[in-house]
Image (cartoon, grey):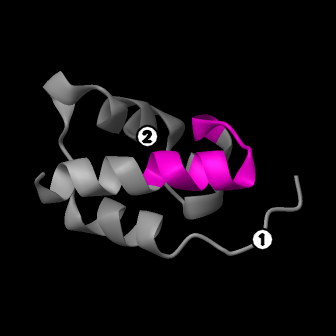
Amino acid sequence: MDIKDAIVNRFLSLCEERNIKINELATLSGVTPSTAYSMMNSARRDISIRTGNKVKYVPPYCFC
């Protein structure tokens, strides 16, 4: 597993933990939904350090 896979796995696990969709977590983390969906596509996994940091620091609570 490389760092890109780890970021995608973390993103998906946060979605599952909080019972929210990829689009919602993207908005909460400050990543555009199009970036989040392109991360999920294994052929297009261009994940920058900035994107990885945004996923890392998602607020702990969602008032959705």
Point out the stretch of residues depicted in magenta: 11-23
Q: List the residue tagged with mark 1.
A: 61
User: Is residue 59 magenta-colored?
Assistant: no
Amino acid at circle 2:
Ala
Q: Residue at x 39, y 40 (%)?
A: 35
Instruction: Tell whether 12 sits left or right of 27.
Output: left
Q: Quadrant of residue 63?
A: bottom right
Q: Earlier in the sequence, mark 2 or mark 1?
A: 2
Q: Callout 1: few (<14), some (14-19), or many (20+) C-alpha neighbours within 10 Å?
A: few
Quarter of the figure with residue 30: bottom right
Q: Is residue 16 magenta?
A: yes
**Amino acid type of disc 1?**
Tyr
> In the image, which disc is placed on residue 49?
none
Q: Percent from the top left, x then y, of residue 42? A: 20, 28
Task: Name the residue located 44 percent from the left edge and 63 percent from the top edge.
Answer: 55
User: Which numbered disc covers residue 36?
Assistant: 2
